[in-house]
Image: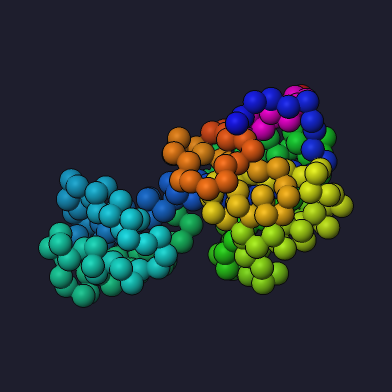
Amino acid sequence: MSSSSNWKPGLVLFDLDDTLCDHDGSLRVRLSASFAAAFNGDPPNHLHEIVEHSIDVSVFGTDHFSDVLRPHGVTDDGLVQAAADVYVADRYRGLELFPEAVDVVKQIAQQADVGMITNGPSDIQRGKIDLLGIEPLFPFILVSEEVDIWKPDPRIFHRAMELGNATPEETVYIGDNPGHDVAGAKAAGITSVWMNRRGADWPGGDRPDHEITDLRQVLEIFAFDRIA
């Protein structure tokens, strides 16, 4: 599924979260800090288990915090609110680019057009982009709320191809979410690359054209030259 190709695409599109930046890792850092506050700064040794339980319940918002914390003895609404306050106060805590991200985008941009498509509210996604300092790398960035189209709707991919002046046959999309990124790219007729950094099993459905664990593999798969 990740064999090399002699084909060099004309347009390479990137997802943001967990493709270019470690959103998943940032979420765990943020939850750890939040739940530590619920224990008055003296968290239990099994805090990581509470964090994982929270992620299993929901990766959105704080409404589930009381249900997650109650089995661990946190029944005071004030402490639950303290956790929620920490969570909301620093939504980008621990957010970083993956080490190879900037270099790979720059390498590809010297040999093909590039762009970004990301799902999410504009204020949050643009805040991440600004914090990470990556807007100058991309001639265009499509944020789903701004264009009122959300992956996996193929129309957002079609919009990106219009901006990149490319056909589906010339385009590659790289993203981590099977349902949003891979399915959306396939629906748009684009070559799909599944970013699987954690080595997860494919959940089922139409498989991606390629699977990678590191963005540098894209250079090899599509025969991009390494430019010093």
- Where residue 108 sits in the image (x, y, percent)? 75, 36
Note whether 14 is above or below 84 in the view shown: above
Residue depicted at x 72% and y 47%? 190
Residue sitting nearer the eye, 100 or 113: 113
Looking at the image, residue 36 lies above or below residue 172 = below
| Left or right of 38 on screen, residue 162 | right
How many numbered discs, if any? 0
Q: Residue furthest right?
A: 165
Relative to residue 217, is residue 187 depicted above or below?
below
Name the image quarter holding residue 215.
Answer: top right
Q: Which residue occupies 64% across, 55% down?
A: 184
Stretch in magenta: 216-227
- Near-viewer residue (28 or 157): 157
Expressed as whole percent of the image width and height from the top left, the position of residue 129 reads: 62, 55
Residue 59 x/y as whole percent: 40, 60
Question: Residue 143: horizontal and vertical position, in percent?
Answer: 66, 63
- The quadrant the N terminus occupies is top right
Furthest-left residue in this view? 73
